[in-house]
Amino acid sequence: SPSPPQVPPATLVRALEGCGVGAAPCHWDPCTLKAADARRVWPVLCEWAKLHPLQQGEASALLGRLQRRASGGEPGRIHFDGVSTLQQQKRRRREGLPARVAAPPPATVAGPSGGAGPRVATADSPPGGGGGGGGRCRFSAVCPFPYARDGRADSVAPLGVVVCSASRGEERFSSLAAAVRAAPEGATVLLGEGETELDGALLLQRPLTLLGARNAVLTARGGGSVVVVDLPGGGAAGGLPPPTLSIVGVGVVQRATEQPGVASACAREGEPARAAAGYAVVVRAGRAELTQCTVQSALSGGCFVSAAASAALRGCHFGAAAMHGVLVSGRARVEMSHCHVHSTGAAGVEARGRSKVRLHCCRVRHSSRSGLFATAFAEAHAEYCNVFQCRFAGIECAGQSEVRVHSCRVHDGERGGLLALGRSSLRVDACAVSRNAMAGVSARGSGRVVVADSAVTSGRASGVHVSEDASATVEHCRVEANGLCGVELSGSAATLVARRNVVRGNGGEAFALPSPQCGGCVQLEGNDLG
């Protein structure tokens, strides 16, 4: 018998909203929906579950769980089984409970009849595949998320500082600056809870571990940085790893009070004082590892990694920044995993020069520029990330940069989803691009774009737009329900290769090509136009 028709998850979400659901899923993990009347929601969920059988015939089992929870669950709440969300994991840590690590295999979204089209998640479903092995991260067997919290600093008195080292045992200090100056290499500096205001930047020049208690915050007022990492011998010599400094569980906040004289001078010139301010955390040399830190800056950006330094940012929160959330320059290397970057005055994460940045399971949202931006000769790689509601493109590359995007969600961008400019190179694999105000994927200038096994849907403009001297290859993709054309080619020098795609249900033509066509610039093979 023919398989039942597939209903887009976006339709499910709209139906749930019509039933009074107050909060719909905003991340790829299963979560809890809050409904005014749960009894109206169950029929919608049950019907959708019937039309979407899970792997290994689990649809009936899921339906049974839904019915059982409907009769005995908490009124007004609908619970999904699966991996804990970030909020649930935080709650379990606060209550001293172990994090849930078991994850069911993700369901594969079926392609249209005839076998054409991608086997990828849509914009409203989990991106990518599940994690393998014994790793706790859903998408990686080696990622240690959720990161275990070290509570040794909780016993330190509020605003107190204790230095622990193997050579001298425990020593107490009245100020953090004095403790850092006296601490030997390899020591652990414990910072008690409360807000410690610094007179100047905290300069860290030897390998240490700065461990904060709950609610331990470092603050500074004026335009200077709060924490500066400058480890001598920052480059690895003789095959040895570079010296490493660790900051764990510490908040870093740059307050809005401006430097005397800076505000008035900038006001006379019509420029904001933030242009003269340093970033809250600066890594100039060596390697810095920030784990479960919160970084905010009312005057500049969150974190700046420059020269040949490197940084690993794990489970960190970069928000409320007047400029970038994370800026990488020179030949620096940055790895970000399970970080949240939001509400930035510039790009959420920007890579310049010949730097390299890698994002794993990160969320980037509400940036005043693009969410992820690479320029010059930088390289950026994002996997299993959620990038949404950015003022410009969700992900943008320019200059001669190279960007690879794998199993990400890029949606609700005000100026498009993914954008390649200049002579940059952009590769998009197994991604869900949806609900963007302009083209879902756009190539301009001499940019090169490859889109494979992805879904580009529900945009206000064309799904894929290629112009000027740019080139695009679109393979095994689903391009549907966009406001204008499915794939649009403008400019006599632009080139397009489209193979085995599903392009239907768009407001204009499936393929809008220039007339007359240039010889050899358009190649269409085996596409399903509905």
Image (spheres, rainbow, N blue to C red):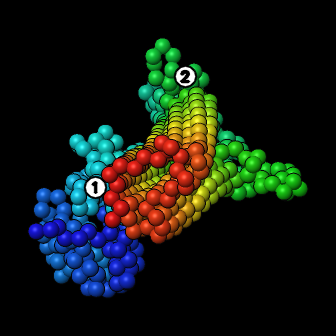
Report the quarter where the N terminus lies: bottom left
User: What type is the residue that disc 1 sits on?
Assistant: Ala
Give the residue displayed 48% in from the left and 42% down from the top: 520
Image location (x, y in percent) of residue 238: 48, 13
Disc assigned to residue 305: none
Left or right: 413 with respect to 346? left
First of labels 2, 1 by sequence position: 1
- Report crowding for label 1: few under 14, some 14 to 19, many 20 or more residues within 10 A (C-alpha): some
Mark 1 lies on a secondary structure that is: loop
Image location (x, y in percent) of residue 433: 44, 58
Disc 2 + disc 1, Cβ < 8 Å: no
Mark 2 lies on a secondary structure that is: loop
Give the residue displayed 22% in from the left and 42% down from the top: 133
User: What type is the residue that disc 2 sits on?
Assistant: Gly
Report the quarter where the C terminus lies: bottom left
Disc assigned to residue 235: 2
Q: Which residue is mark 1?
A: 116
Image location (x, y in percent) of residue 204: 60, 33
Residue 326 seen anywhere in this rendered image of the structure: no
